[in-house]
Image: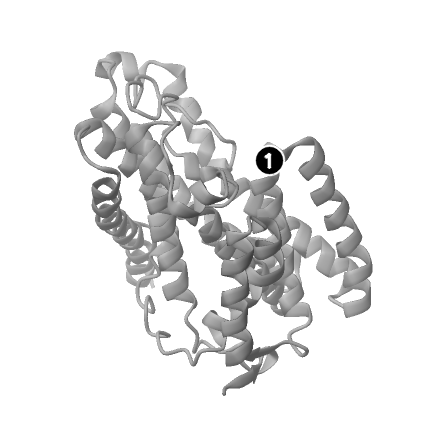
């Protein structure tokens, strides 16, 4: 059976991360298809139904994004220890595609779908308030858009909530690196008590925000995998046992334990410990982030234009269209500026 030390492959590009993030983006779409087509009281995916909404396919997908995000951001902290370099890279990774999608939704999709006239739409201050999403200030509504959809509250892009949380994690991770230099003892002494207190506090007093706190904790578990990469071994038997244990814990409705104690190891085993057979997937076009940004507005659009479409029909169409949106992002946000830059040289 294969056993690999994480530190031996942590820097390698031979991994399955792009495929796993793509699958996670698909899971988010599947998770949202019920509420978008049937409304807020609709039954969700089978994991959501079994755990009374505490865990969904979308929650697992977000967990995967945050676990790997913590690992890769910790690596970036060590490689680019200067704040200017580190944050420049983070800004260039996060914001250009986000701003492009926000602008396209506000000024192209919005006026086409709004119940208001074009003049009313473009003279409404709410149209321009929506642009604040491009700087991680969440504004969920556009005037007259999706107001009669089954979901009921006219949310244009519910998935954006993770981005300010993620960027905050970037900042805290960099600060943590500067304080601890990712020394194992200092990292444990500082991070574990803080995360434990925060998690227990929110679990007791703000259980409705538990998904946010869970994402943050998973991010720092990902950071911990980087800090302790010399001590982590990815073993086939351990991975299979972890998968079985995860399923049992979810079946017993111990989903918090499953997500925080077992899920991260499964992610790293599948991502790094299974041979990297899909390492070429997404090598040219990394689609998951663009899909994530486009998916919810697309699903809401489908729900408005095709009200009889089933949840799975909505999901299937949205997956295809979100891939198209992600490719549009690549050519407009990545490819065109690169071509323009090469011409100027």
The residue nearer to you, when weighing 187 against 130, is: 187
The residue nearer to you, when weighing 166 against 67, is: 67
Q: Which residue is mark 1?
A: 209
* Above or below, comparing residue 140 to residue 267 in the picture: above
The x, y position of residue 150, in whole percent, is 30, 24
- Would residue 265 be visible to someone looking at this image? yes
| Furthest residue in direction bottom, as rendered | 1
Q: Residue at position x 45%, y 38% from top?
A: 160
The residue nearer to you, when weighing 226 against 341, is: 226
**Quadrant position of residue 129:** top left
- Would residue 290 be visible to someone looking at this image? no
Say whether residue 320 is left or right of residue 161.
left
Say whether residue 278 is left or right of residue 9.
left
Q: Residue at position x 48%, y 47% from top?
A: 59
Q: Residue at position x 45%, y 33% from top?
A: 133
The residue nearer to you, when weighing 144 against 340, is: 144
Kindly state the secondary structure of the residue where label 1 is placed: helix
Considering the image in quadrants, where does the C terminus appear? bottom left
| Furthest residue in direction front, as rendered | 252
The x, y position of residue 34, in whole percent, is 33, 36
**Quadrant position of residue 148:** top left
């Amino acid at each position: 059976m294969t056993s690999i030390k994480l530190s031996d492959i942590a820097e390698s590009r031979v991994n399955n991360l792009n495929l796993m993030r793509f699958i996670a983006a698909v899971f988010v779409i599947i998770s949202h298809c019920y509420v978008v087509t049937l409304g807020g009281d609709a039954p969700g995916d089978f994991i959501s139904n079994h755990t009374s909404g505490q865990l969904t396919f979308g929650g697992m997908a977000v967990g995967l994004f945050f676990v790997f995000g913590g690992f890769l951001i910790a690596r970036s902290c060590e490689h680019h220890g200067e704040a200017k370099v580190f944050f420049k890279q983070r800004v260039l990774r996060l914001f250009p595609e986000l701003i492009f999608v926000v602008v396209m939704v506000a000024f192209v999709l919005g006026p086409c779908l709004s119940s208001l006239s074009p003049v009313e739409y473009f003279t409404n201050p709410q149209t321009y308030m929506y642009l604040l999403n491009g700087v991680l200030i969440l504004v969920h509504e556009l005037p007259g858009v999706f107001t009669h959809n089954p979901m009921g509250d006219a949310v244009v892009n519910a998935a954006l909530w993770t981005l300010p949380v993620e960027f905050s994690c970037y900042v805290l991770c960099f600060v943590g690196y500067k304080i601890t230099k990712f020394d194992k003892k200092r990292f444990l002494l500082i991070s574990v008590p803080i995360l434990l207190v925060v998690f227990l506090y929110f679990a007791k007093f703000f259980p409705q925000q538990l998904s946010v706190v869970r994402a943050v904790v998973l991010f720092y578990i990902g950071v911990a995998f980087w800090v302790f990469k010399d001590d982590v071994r990815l073993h086939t038997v351990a991975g299979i046992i972890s998968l079985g244990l995860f399923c049992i814990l979810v079946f017993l409705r111990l989903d918090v334990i499953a997500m925080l104690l077992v899920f991260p190891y499964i992610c790293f085993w599948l991502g790094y410990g299974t041979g990297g057979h899909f390492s070429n997937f997404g090598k040219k076009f990394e689609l998951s982030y663009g899909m994530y940004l486009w998916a919810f507005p697309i699903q809401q659009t489908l729900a408005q234009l095709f009200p009889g479409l089933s949840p799975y029909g909505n999901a299937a169409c949205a997956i295809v269209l979100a891939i198209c949106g992600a490719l549009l992002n690549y050519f407009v946000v990545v490819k065109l500026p690169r071509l323009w830059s090469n011409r100027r040289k």
